[in-house]
Image (cartoon, coloured by chain):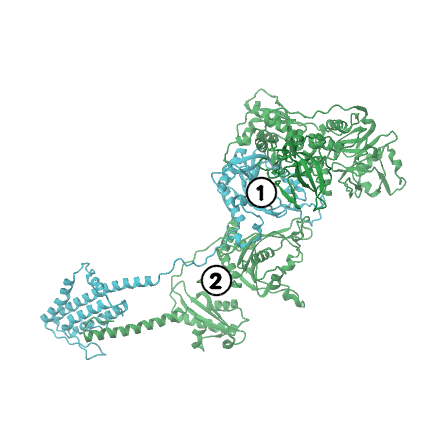
Amino acid sequence: MKVSYKWLKTMVSVPDDISAFADRLDMTGTAVEDISSTGATMDGIVVGQILTKKPHPNADSLWVTTVDVGANNKTCNDSSDNNIAGNNIAHEPLQIVCGAQNFNAGDKVPVATVGTIMPNTSATEDKGHFIIKKAKLRGIESCGMNCSAKELGLGDDHAGLLILPKDAPVGMPIARYLDICDTVFDLEITPNRPDCMSMLGVAREVAAIYDVDFSLGKQIDEPKLDGKATDCVKVVIDDASRCSRYTAAIIRGVKVGPSPQWLAERVTAAGARSINNVVDATNYIMFELGQPLHAFDLDTLAKDDHGKAQIVVRAAIDGEKFTTLDGIQRTLSNDITVISDGNAILEVNKANFNNNKNLDSVYRSEDNTSNDSCSNENNTDAICVPQAIALAGVMGGLDSEVTNSTTNILLESATFSSSHTSRTSRNLQLFSEAAGRYERGVDAATCGDFAQRAAALIALVAGGTVCEGLADVYVNPKELPILNLDCHRLRRFIGADIASDEAVAILERLGCSVSRAANDNSCANDNSLDIYNVTPPSFRPDLEREIDLYEEILRIWGMQNVPLTLPTGAGRIGLFSIEQIRSERIGASLRAMGINETMTYAFASPQDMQLLRLPVPKDQKAVSLLNPMNADQSVMRQSIIPGLLRSVAYNLNHGVNDVHLYEAGVVFSTSEGRKLPRERKMLACVLCGSWHQQQWNETARRIDFFDVKGIIQSLLRELNCQAPRFKVLESKIEANDESSQNEFWLQPGRAASVLVGSLQLGWVGEIHPLVLRDFDVQASVLAFELDFNALLVAANAKREYKDVPQYPAVERDIAITLDTAISCERVEQVIRTAAGALLYNIRLFDVYKNTERLGVNKQSLAFALEYRSSERTLTADEVDKLHNKVLRKLTAATGGKVRGSEDGSEDGKVHENEEGRDDDRTAKNLVENAVKNVAENVLGNIACDGEQSVR
Amino acid sequence: MQEIESDTSANILGAPDEDGVALSDGERGNNTCVNLPQIAKTHDLALSLEAGNQDESSLITVQDLPAIQQAALNAITTAGDSRILDDVRVAFLGKKGSLTSILRGMGSIPKEQRGEVGRVVNETKTVIESALKKRGEELAAQELQAQISASAIDVTLPGRNFTIGSQHLISRLTAEIVDVFRGIGYQVHEGTEVETDYYNFVALNYTPDHPARRSQDTFYVRDLSGDKTAVVGESDVLLRTQTSGGQVHVMETQKPPIYILSPGRVYRRDVADPSHLPQFTQIEGLVVDEGITFADLKGTLDYFCKAIFGNDRKTRFRPHYFPFTEPSAEVDVSCGICGGSGCRFCKGTGWLEILGCGMVDPNVFGFVNIDPNRYSGFAFGLGVERIACLKYDIADLRMLLEGDMRFLRQF
């Protein structure tokens, strides 16, 4: 809501300190969103007179002018004194190059002299200001600017210069001449304050804040009266739930033309465009009083035999066509309320009409002559209804619009239902000042009085006479509520010591009438004395309950005066649920492993899952938005991976090649018949490049499948999960589909599903190259996506203590050469089964592939086995026996060849397990030999001469 | 072998003996050089012993003891490293060592002389052992020193990578804020991101035509249940525009006292630009208890602002309107850059808006069957992205969703 300070000052006494005033509004609940000045920043812009106008020699559309700006005339070089107060410099016209076409020599125009900061920029926005400088335009020097209205911030007219009246005194500051020094506040009016959507409301609010009086300010003389409104128009409200009051005033003999300056100025200050005197007058009243008005050209409305017009407020008929004054033909629905005249020429299919029950009864009950004009009276399938002339509260119709030739006006001042108006403007995407006010609620109690003030204003600015009274239908006037105010409870609720008389005074200042509640018995105590009956004014429909009064009292009394305390209630404890603790641990573990948490859009493109090639169960659909921001974000994501792949691409495109990201977030899916979709929290991770760049002491190892697998294993260990299983994941697409290999989101052979027991956690693998191509990722990406809640389920809160080993372990290695088709998991399983309980630990320490030495499709796996008993020290014999059994069973089960058993000489060369062991042995020998030699030398020396000559 | 410097020898001799008494050169000399010949003469023994199976020709007798002792001490003094020293020990005291040979030959010495010979041999042994020990310690110290010197490194070379991943700024802040409230007895409740109109609007006392419901502001989801709504383009199902709906879920299922915090992602139809995102993070707080006052709300949020922004910051409460609270307020925290005097960051006001709050509207209690005459409560909601902006002055909020490693690694 735009509020002109100048206007406001005519209604209520306000402080001169604008920022103090804005602060006060802020602190009482009316947020000041912007403060802009008009006029105040027009220093340097003065009234000038064009002396000469010559075509620019180098440009077709430019003019070279000389302009007399009176005492402000100066040479271009004299920019030292920009003061409009004038000095003694010789009056010399300015040469100004000008692009406007609408002027002649002799015209008076606003001239911005050199150094002027142009005003058309908001005070609080930090835009650069446009400063007038001396410049050469196509070779001709220009010392200022002739201004349009828009350049002065006075309107949208940018077509040409603002031509001033002939009597404008040359040299006078334009702000003073136009009297346009003003400050405009843009106030945020909260939805509960429909009353503040007017200057009257704001003035009333300001008066309450400062405890001063207010008035309407503008005096409008009583108009000349002629005839009675009720003789000219009859109003019928078909459905009272859509319109609680409708008043029509009649003004005859108006002359539509430009508005007087004061009117245009105020309408402009309020944020509207000045159109003509009649429209401006209706807008003025809307801004002044908050009552939306609509002026119909009375002569375009159908009349009965007595020349009486009829206004019917009715529901629109489904499919009804109507052309609004913007020239657009719209198809209406039953939810929309229309104003129609008595001109029943609209043919409607009876089937549709029958749905319109209210109208049916009203219309038939009327002895309506306009039925005669219905061309299709005898058609039983169609019925005639009155022609719509406006969409109630939203927009008028093209046919009944006030034009320059209009002389008689029907002025509508009504109260339409906020919900119908709101839905209509939302459905038709038509938002206007009027609709906005109806949406918040318009006071029915005052709409008649306001109509009469509007009629008087029209007569004042457009001439003519006003018909006495109004055609006024007011259905069920609302009774004002009487609210209780218990000041003792107020103080208890706010936690501040607000004096009762102060509370009462505040409510009275806000327009409430307050009386002490009658004591109904003799046992009156202090509290009962503090109870009051409060009747809020009709313009405050938001004051419905005692609590609403508390808010009013608190905001005017001052929230800043309320002390700071903390709730004292007992029996509460701040803690995390076990799931929250686990969620924290999951994040902390992944970060400990070097992965960075990120967030991506929950929105997705409908193509994402196809691009990702991640199969979605047939009954699951993407959750789609009815009003997405754009096509690429029109559904909710079904996987986090596409978003993460985009982040990988983003990083690669910005030269970051090592990318380690995870995100824990929700994915969405739905199915036919569902209202709310399924939301599944997932944990997704993408890794690309190396863990770090090449270092002086560390190589930059590429991240591979076993990094990402290891991350899952470590994560599950940290969550105390049972060890996960990684099952080979294969494309399940029909065998006859040859492209199936390419319709898989992971690279076949580098893909696994992750299970804990029978619980599916998700998948891990290397993203398929074709997917990477489609997401513009130029590097290989390892990824996993796990079900977050499954992780939480798999996590185990109970940790069991086991004795640390008391007896020593005996270690034995196994190296077995076997087909690559036999999985490591299988080999390990055989070993474990064969070894039984004494096998304490098993560790794969080498995988060796060499086609020449081992053969095609063969590999050698080397395991270190740790045998240990928790009860005794194992003997070498029993371990050897057990180990041999393991070897036997292993070869039998896998068809593998245990290395070392027949071909032991090569063993050490193939698998260099614990290489230190051999080295140690060698070192020991070397030492022994050295000592021997030294000892001999020493003894030799002693034997020879006993001298100290050991070297 | 390395040469032993003379001052090192002096050190050996000057080092404390086994009794802990330091001997001068002279005393040490007397002890070793004088006594041994005497013993030999007194007993006039001729010991003839085999040095070992391997070397039958070399016989060592008790008369050789002084020479052996001298030779041993010489060898010990000149031993250049602990390995040589050990060889010396083996040569004299080892299984086949010269002194050991004498002891081994004791059997052949007359019984009455055995005690005396044994004493002398043992004395010699003690002297040698003591010298060995001293020299051993000396050499060990030298060698350790040498080893340490040799292993000196350039400690300014970069350390190895143990890169810890970073937490996303928003979840970091969320956790920080949750922690502040957990400290004063709040628990966390999380809800779903897709909500029904009822929980997002109706039960929060929004009128059916509240502007927030406009499809310009709220993302509506295609409702597959077949239900229809009055306004074209709207739906009964939507992406929650606020975590406030969590309030309703909590109050439906829990009885007061309720002290909860509900963090989560919310959605509003804003074009993503430097200062807006269509999805962001909100934290909703709710307290319902007996005797909760507006002063409690002020105190709680003032405590929160000081905990998050610093103790020197002030708060101010401006009356505002929210459908689900009455009275309602917006909370500003004093600008941390200018300290409240007004600057570019706070647009000259000295204050930064951070959250909205208010006392729970009795109508909301009505939706969840909590008696407003017995209980009162307050609710507040804050945008984590906004706090991130205020704390870190982030130039472009879209950075939060790009996954740029260079951005993420800063927090």
Q: Amino acid at mark 2?
A: Gln
Tag 2, which secondary structure? loop
Give me the residue at 36% from left, 71% from top.
A921
Numbered badge on residue B82: none
Amino acid type at mark 1: Val
Q: Position of residue B95 (x, y in %)?
A: 23, 72
Q: Residues within 10 Å of mark 2 (few under 14, many from 20)?
A: few
Q: Are marks 1 and 2 in contact (CB under 8 Å)?
A: no
* Disc 1/disc 2 C-alpha distance (Å): 52 Å
**Residue B250, numbered label:** 1
Q: Position of residue A583 (x, y in %)?
A: 52, 51
B33 on left or right of A782: left
- The residue identified by callout 2 is A694
Q: Secondary structure at mark 1?
A: helix
Which chain has been coloured cyan in this picture? B
Single out the residue that lies furthest toward the top: A522
Q: Which chain is green?
A: A
Question: Residue A481 occupies which quadrant of the picture?
Answer: top right
- Residue A772, compared with residue A931, is above or below; it is above
Q: Nearer the viewer, residue B239 or A328?
A: A328
Tell me if I can see residue A237 in this picture.
Answer: no
